[in-house]
Amino acid sequence: MSVYPLVQAGFGAPQRQKRWKVAIRLILAIPLIVWYFLISIAAGFLIVVGWFCALVLGRLPRSFVQPLSEFVVFTTRTNSYLYLMNDAYPPFSAKKDFGVNVEIPNTNVRRSAVLFRIVLVIPAAVVSALVTGGTEVAAVFIWLIVLVKGEMPVSLFAALAAILRYQARFFSYYAMLTSKYPGELFGDEPSSEASTSHDVVTSPDQPVPAPPLHDGINEAVAAVSTDETAASTVIGGAEAEPGVQTFGAPTGAPVQFDADRSSSVGEVAPRTARLVLSQASKRILVTLLILGVIGNGANAVLRNKLLDNQSALTRLAIANNTLNTQVASAKVVRGICSHGTTACTQQYFTAIATAFGNFDNTLNGINFPSSAHTDAVRLEATTGKFVALLNQFKSATAITQAQINHLNTLGNGFDTQLNQVASDLSSPL
């Protein structure tokens, strides 16, 4: 069984990055994104099937543990690359060596918690959506910072590490890999005691190296007891030397996920680390949460606006298609009319007036959004005038050229305003 009750992650420390790779990071990440999309479909299928199995067995089937755990590892590594936390390209296989690692203790789950998992996970899903949305809003600024500096500031690095660890915990709980509810978004509490032997961060093949000190990482050299230290560090379980905070997750053989036991390798502690955030990192997390609230709120408003626009545009298009069909039918009837010129003309205008009258009724029943309201009012007024003039033609024995010109003017205005309203509804803003 895993020595850690929660899903743990190790991200190492921020390193110097090639600026050209930072500049085109999204392009470089396209293969990773495509692969993520493909395996996420498979992961979704396993979760659905695994839910029924866990409801019966009280645990996720062992054959599901490894692929879902590897999905979490790949997702975390890919996001760390997209978030510009490291320069190394993540491997497509979670079993291959990489500096970002996740340790997932697979545990039994209560059947009642499985039954209501989709409800229980909502608060964690909201938090995950907010911090993810906030990070997406701030993505351009993060990109500029790393592009200019050539590496990520330590406080920002640790804040993003806390987000990725929380996302890994959230998905692991949602996928029923663990029964432990996701938490500790703002990092772990500083240890007040010397760490136990279980907390030592080691690799099966190599010792933990000392954290490198170079430009941009000198913030790591600070008093451990100082709350306002600039270092937001990923702290290993090993007790730090006086005056130096140690980083976790040394590069080495990755944690192998064993479906028969857990995600740890034998009795060796996983290459993950406790995450203790400085006040600077916590302020960054609060800022990202606020940005997430603003971004998700704006997205909801825009989505509702687009839905309203689409609904009005669909009804307008249907009404216009019906109108065109009725006008075309009236023209056909007029062409084969055998009642004489005046009677055929009156019959034609009666059909046209009816068609535009129906369109006008539909137009009045459409709830146009504010962005199209002004032009819709103009269209309704023009349509009303058009219908009134057509009603005059229904019983007229003679129609003057001036009346025909006026009808053409109203018809041209109708077409122009109809296109303008459709354009208003097609615009996302």
Image (tube, grey):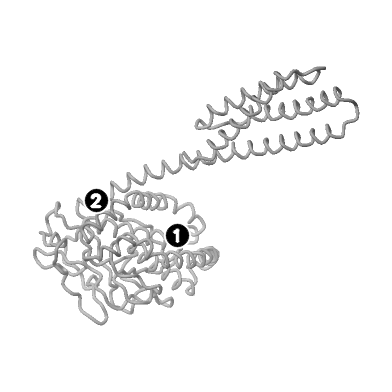
Label placed on residue 364 = none
Query: CA separation, marks 1 and 2?
Result: 25 Å
Asked if marks 1 and 2 touch (Cβ < 8 Å), the reply is no
Q: Residues within 10 Å of mark 2 (few under 14, many from 20)?
A: many
Residue type pointed to by label 1:
Tyr
> Which residue occupies 33% across, 64% down?
81
- The percent position of residue 2, horizontal first and vertical second, equals 34, 71
Question: Under tag 2, what secondary structure?
Answer: helix
Is 419 left, or right, of 157 in this rendering? right
Q: Is residue 270 above or below residue 404?
A: below
Q: Is residue 117 above or below residue 54?
A: above
| Quarter of the figure with the N terminus | bottom left
Question: Under tag 1, what secondary structure?
Answer: helix
Residue type pointed to by label 2:
Lys
> Which residue occupies 82% across, 36% down?
332
Between residues 59 and 305, which one lies in front from this camera angle?
Answer: 305
| Viewer-nearest of discs 1 and 2 | 2
Q: For residue 30, which quarter of the picture?
A: bottom left
Between residues 213 and 55, which one lies in front from this camera angle?
Answer: 213
The residue carrying mark 2 is: 282
- The percent position of residue 278, horizontal first and vertical second, equals 19, 54
Between residues 37 and 402, which one lies in front from this camera angle?
Answer: 402
- The percent position of residue 349, horizontal first and vertical second, equals 78, 25
The residue carrying mark 1 is: 174
